[in-house]
Amino acid sequence: MINLYPTLGRNLLFLLDAEKAHTLSIQALKLGLYPRFNNRFDPRLGVDIAGLSFPNPLGMAAGYDKNGDAPDPLLQMGFGHAEVGTVTPQPQPGNPKPRIFRLVEDHGVINRLGFNSKGHQRVVATLQQHDSSKGIVGVNIGANKTSQDFAADYVAGIHAFADIATYFTVNISSPNTPGLRALQGGDPLIDLLQRVDEARLQETKKSGRRIPVFLKIAPDLDDSELDAIAQALEQSDIDALIVSNTTLSRVGLSSPNKDETGGLSGKPLFDRATIILAKMRLRLPEGFPLIGVGGITDAETAFSKMEAGANLIQLYSGLIYGGPGLPGKILTGLAQRLDEEKVDSIQNIVGRKAKDWSALKLV
Ligand SMILES: Cc1cc2nc3c(=O)[nH]c(=O)nc-3n(C[C@H](O)[C@H](O)[C@H](O)COP(=O)(O)O)c2cc1C
């Protein structure tokens, strides 16, 4: 299929408000209007972590398919896993629109959606229709804005999706829910991880299946905060760390939308998120799985993210600029790099440049 997205498709979608374009793209996926990538089972790209076998390292990051409408199309497009959510216990509308802004000149996005979600019950019902034989579908869980006990909302998420999630992500790093990022340190983090561990243990006892739980952090953390997270992870049963969510930083941007409130993602996030990823790689025990997200736009940035320490990678904003052919292009590019370097497994490059990346200064 000729890829018209970078020219025609993108120009048309960019005429629309960003959130309308997003809704339209989900509709297109549901109607089957997307390119299939049929070559996604190159065994050299396979990744085994947290007791799961990922067919390739590239996943769809949370926030694109918040309500679980299109995990199967995303997997058909080439993604080795699709992360649905963030889902909150009760339905909530999120912040007033407009709340997603393209930063075209910077290849970035700012969003302040504020966890718009159809809520656990509706998303469980939608996901029950998905064909679970098709691949790995994680559920990213969050808290309602008006919740009196954020940790209880994550516990509710574990119980609600235990029968259908391949893995969970505990998302404590959205900048758009006031107070949420405070869960990233000290006693609140330790308490949260304990309660999540307990909920998962209860579900494991019931079903005999231990569902991996990942934690997703922000890129706006200093060295001592990263130390505290590494320590808390070592005391917990969490299976992997996702680095990172969007940033509040606004360095080096030129787009007219650069001063919008919200979290910044896409190309301008790449360096910051990759440095924080590498810092965590060096803080955590060798072999502890890391998932690198933030600013991946092509095979080169995907490869660099893995060299900095990621076992798996995810993207979202890159898809807005690169279109639905991007996952296939990235996977083909990664396989080419393995050919060129005569490496038999993508896992052999993980972290080999972690020291170089972690030594870079955050700006
Ligand atoms: C419009 C939008 C909505 C998002 N919503 C969520 C979300 O609900 N939960 C979450 O964990 N991350 C969310 N994210 C963050 C992404 O999952 C990802 O961590 C971040 O965008 C960095 O990756 P990228 O540069 O490839 O976009 C969202 C990002 C965007 C652009």
Image: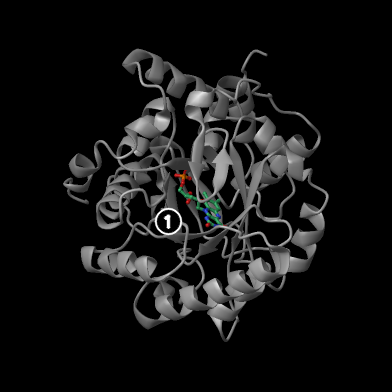
Horizontal side, residue 351 vs residue 242: left or right: left
Horizontal side, residue 216 vs residue 169: left or right: left
Q: Can residue 120 be spotted in the picture?
A: yes
Looking at the image, residue 120 lies above or below residue 298: below
Q: What is the image's colouring?
A: one colour
Looking at the image, residue 344 lies above or below residue 67: above
In which quadrant of the rendered view does residue 341 lie?
A: top left
Residue drawn at point x = 16 percent, y = 47 percent: 359
Would you say the beta carbon of the disc 1 residue lies within 8 angstroms of ligand 1? no
Q: Can residue 119 be spotted in the picture?
A: no
Residue drawn at point x = 37 percent, y = 27 percent: 300
Question: Label 1 sits on what residue type?
Answer: Leu
Looking at the image, residue 268 lies above or below residue 244: above
Give the x, y percent position of residue 271.
Answer: 30, 43
Give the x, y percent position of residue 71.
Answer: 70, 43
In the orientation shown, which residue stands out farthest toward the bottom? 148
Numbered marks: total: 1
Looking at the image, residue 36 lies above or below residue 168: above
Give the x, y percent position of residue 233.
Answer: 38, 66
Give the x, y percent position of residue 188.
Answer: 42, 80
In which quadrant of the rendered view does residue 60 lie?
A: top right
Q: Which residue is mark 1?
A: 241
Q: Secondary structure at mark 1?
A: strand
Camera-nearest residue between 229 and 220? 229
What crowding class fits label 1: few (fewer than 14 Cα within 10 Å), some (14-19), or many (20 or more)?
Answer: many
Horizontal side, residue 344 vs residue 252: left or right: right
Q: Quadrant of the N terminus?
A: top right
Residue drawn at point x = 68 percent, y = 24 percent: 35
